[in-house]
Amino acid sequence: MNSGTTNIGVLGAGQLGRMLALAGYPLGNRFTFLDTTGNPSAGIGEVIVDPDNQHLAEFLAKVDVVTYEFEHLPVTLVQEIEKHKPVYPSSRAIEVCQNRVEEKTLFDRLNIPTPAYRVVESAEQLEAAARELGCPVVAKSVTEGYDGKGQAVLKAPEEAANAWQSIGHTQLIVEAFVDFVREVSMIAVRGRDGEVVFYPMAENQHVGGILRYSVAPLPDLDAQVQQTADTYIRALLDELDYVGVLALELFQTRDGSLLANEMAPRVHNSGHWTMDGAVTSQFENHLRAVQGLPLGSTAAIAPTCMVNVIGQEGDNVAMLKLANTHVHRYDKAERAGRKLAHVNVVAATHAELLEKVRTCQALIPDAPAVEWSFERSL
């Protein structure tokens, strides 16, 4: 990359694109967003609204390199763009992540352990899989499911017919429940030259399939567990010849082992803590990667917790009075289930962090109580 301005095209125009742009302006980047939904919310840069795919040539004329902020894009659109401009990560990454069967097959091939699963194509097969795996099981649509959508939990095999009908897809993945200690995620970045850097693992709390809290680094994490996660995500990055940020969600079981749940080929909600808690944020490092720049340090500055604000705004004035607490709003109207903002709480110790997070939680409507697996180690 030379010292001039790089015009970055972003597929999608939501809050992740907004945060990419905010991280990219200090690098001298300009941003053009291509919105395929008709409902852009980035509120920054130039936005081309194109739900009917009429303005692709205009978008391509404005950009040097293309990335994306969500993976639910037509693969054919990304492949068409690749004929004209570099796209990072590639369409192959999107193709795998849009199909849970392909994703599980890739995990299996790379010896990345996952919960036991079956692929089913009828209510009868779903019932048989539930009996074989042992209830409870979770059934997920093979495509188009995210943030808890397209899923059902079966507590008994007899619930298969209702679950099949409620999900409404022709093919499902059925997964055995995992007796896990905590949900964790790994975020790593791979540059165009193959360099890979890893962020400290985060512990995540989900409610109703939506992430509510992420904390990193973890005070009780065995170095060997972090190293294992690094190995898994590096295998994915290298196999896909990946460029940019990749997130891998995992379950940590009682014996310390890790089981992969799913991956996301983009900057990720569980990495928002890096904006205030790491030397280089996931957003800046993603942009560094796609432009061929050296990657920045991923070291944590201090214990940090990301708190998602869902549905209703919190008391932002009161939260900003808390020392080393940072509010990141997305300029979105309130609506049930909608991600409106996140708050990054930073503290000198994990004990202080938990105290501050609980203070913050009281200032956010419907924020769930939070309990961390590492609390007993403090």
Image: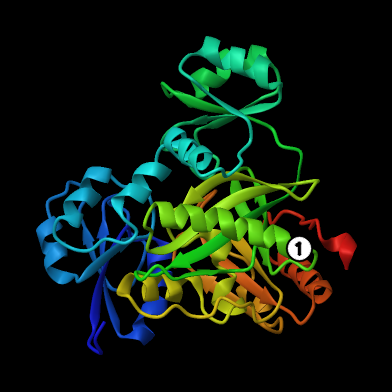
- Foreground: 347 or 308? 347
What's under tag 1, amino acid-wise? Leu
Residue at (70%, 17%) from the top-left corner?
156
Residue 213 in which image quadrant: bottom right
Name the colour scheme. rainbow
Q: Is residue 28 above or below residue 71?
A: below
Residue 213 seen: no
- What residue is rendered at 44% in x and 77% in y? 295
Mark 1 neighbour density, 10 Å: few (under 14) some (14–19) many (20 or more): some
Displayed quadrant of residue 278: bottom right
Name the secondary structure under disc 1.
loop
Can residue 146 be seen here? The reply is yes
Vertically, is 157 above or below 339? above
The residue at the point 51 percent across, 61 percent down is: 340
Q: Would you place residue 194 above or below residue 178 in this image?
A: below
Residue that label 1 marks: 221
The x and y percentages for residue 347 are: 74, 79
Q: Which residue is drawn at 54% across and 49% down?
A: 337
The quadrant of the rendering that contains the N terminus is bottom left
Left or right: 311, with 30 as reference point: right
Return the x and y of residue 104 as percentages of the image width and height.
50, 37
Q: Which of the pair 321/100 is nearer the observer?
A: 100
